[in-house]
Amino acid sequence: MAAMLASPSLALARAAGRLSRRLGRGGGTSLPGKLLLSVRAGAVAELGAGLPRGSVLVSATNGKTTTARLIAACARAAGWRLVANQSGANLASGVATALLDDAALPLAERAELGLFEVDEAALPAVAAQLRPRALVLMNLFRDQLDRHGELEALSTRWADALAGLPPAVTTVVANADDPAVAALVEGRAGSITFGIDDPAVALPALPHAADAKRCRRCGAPLEHDLVLLGHLGHWRCPACGAARPRPDVRATRVELDGARAIALRVETPAGPIEARLGLPGLHNAYNATAAIAGALALGVPAELIGPALAGSANAFGRFERVRVGGQELAILLAKNPAGANEIVRTILLDGAPLHLLVALNDRTADGHDVSWIWDVDFELLLPRIADLTLSGDRAHDLGLRFRYAGLDSGRMRIVPDLERGLDAAL
């Protein structure tokens, strides 16, 4: 480890990050790690080996940024020093950059625990290097097919990754309500499952855009006794008998307070935990429940978790509220049908007319395939729209989608330039 810290490759990578920030070419959250890994492929493993409390990885299609921040709040409440990639750089290069920055600190200030959100496709490689103490697996939804492929391919890669992480090394925290994720820990010793057990927040039926509809064990169509979010819920296979396991960590009461907050009561092996969070929507109830399970897996005392969750700030773009020109804006991020439909469901919780700016890009970080917008239930918004501005590189695709939804073209404005679009919306 000492030789690693003194290596010229670390100094070069740090210098690249400083130069990137100075030139305004980025925040230096990925480039240093990318450069470091190009000259020292095992850098993540070498740097991660210096963490006294090991590391925890959080991966999912939706919710990993928020869940990682919530777990971080719990770990800090326990007094632990953390290194995390909270900027959202969740590929191996982002993890390497975070570890690189931490290694530059004086020894007494360096992190005890690594907490990293990891892109679902990058997870196997990162997990193989870090061999994490805990691995939080939240959900798998259809997302960026041009990069990730279908869900079956991703879940198979996750299964292969878990095979290289014995239970004695890694505690897996898995979503019991996602059939594909629950199948990964079937029969695995020491795993912890979480889920939602409040029928009051159930959907009337499985959404048309639901993803995991077939049994991972036998391939037969699944049935749901309770549908909660997308394909998440209380599922079972009538053909082979596979079924949702009873979660170890269960949200038994979920109160949705409009588009501003949620309140939870979560039953755990360490006793009930209650919290009120300034994060709205059922998807954030899942994130908070996953964070509780992850914090308990790390050994955070149960009595610290509720207050820590309540005091956690929203991540960038995740119902973040800012003031611009005297107006309050709520910023929401969606990148696939399941996430977008849950945002639609959440903003409809309040009865006020909707003033919306909807922006869509198709750049590398966004995914080049934007066909997913045709599986978003924009139709539900139409009766409540008071004002609609469409922006971004694919603003005209959004215009076509809303036109097919039944919105007259005279009720929308299309401004592809995002800065001008924001001005027009304001």
Image (cartoon, grey):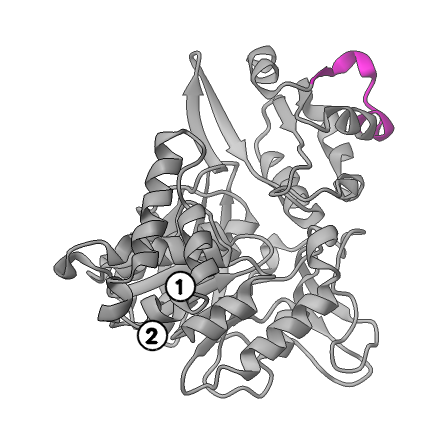
* Residue 91 drawn at (x, y percent): 51, 55
- C-alpha gap between disc 2 and disc 1: 11 Å
Residue 161: which quarter of the image? Answer: bottom right
- Looking at this view, is 113 or 98 the one in front? 98
Q: Secondary structure at mark 2?
A: loop
- Looking at this view, is 61 or 201 the one in front? 61
Bin the neighbour count of mark 1 within 10 Å (Cα to Cα): few under 14, some 14-19, many 20 and up: many
Q: Which mark is residue 376?
A: none
The answer to whether mark 2 and mark 1 are in CB contact below 8 A is no
Residue 301: which quarter of the image? Answer: bottom left
Q: Secondary structure at mark 1?
A: helix
Query: At 61% across and 60% down in the image, what residue appears?
Result: 199
| Three-letter code, disc 2 | Ala
**Residue 143 visible, this angle:** yes
- Looking at this view, is 175 or 226 the one in front? 175
**Residue 254 visible, this angle:** no
Q: Looking at the picture, does residue 169 appear above or below residue 156?
A: below
| Three-letter code, disc 1 | Ile
Q: Looking at the picture, does residue 7 appear above or below residue 215?
A: above
**Among numbered discs 2 and 1, the one appearing first in the sequence:** 2
Query: At 13% across and 60% down in the image, what residue appears?
Result: 108
Would you say residue 133 sits in the magenta stretch? no
Residue identifier under label 1:
292
* Residue 214 drawn at (x, y percent): 79, 71
Lateral position of residue 284 relative to residue 367, left or right:
left
Residue identifier under label 2:
270
* Residue 168 drawn at (x, y percent): 41, 87
Residue span colored magenta: 402-415
Lateral position of residue 303 relative to residue 250, left or right:
left
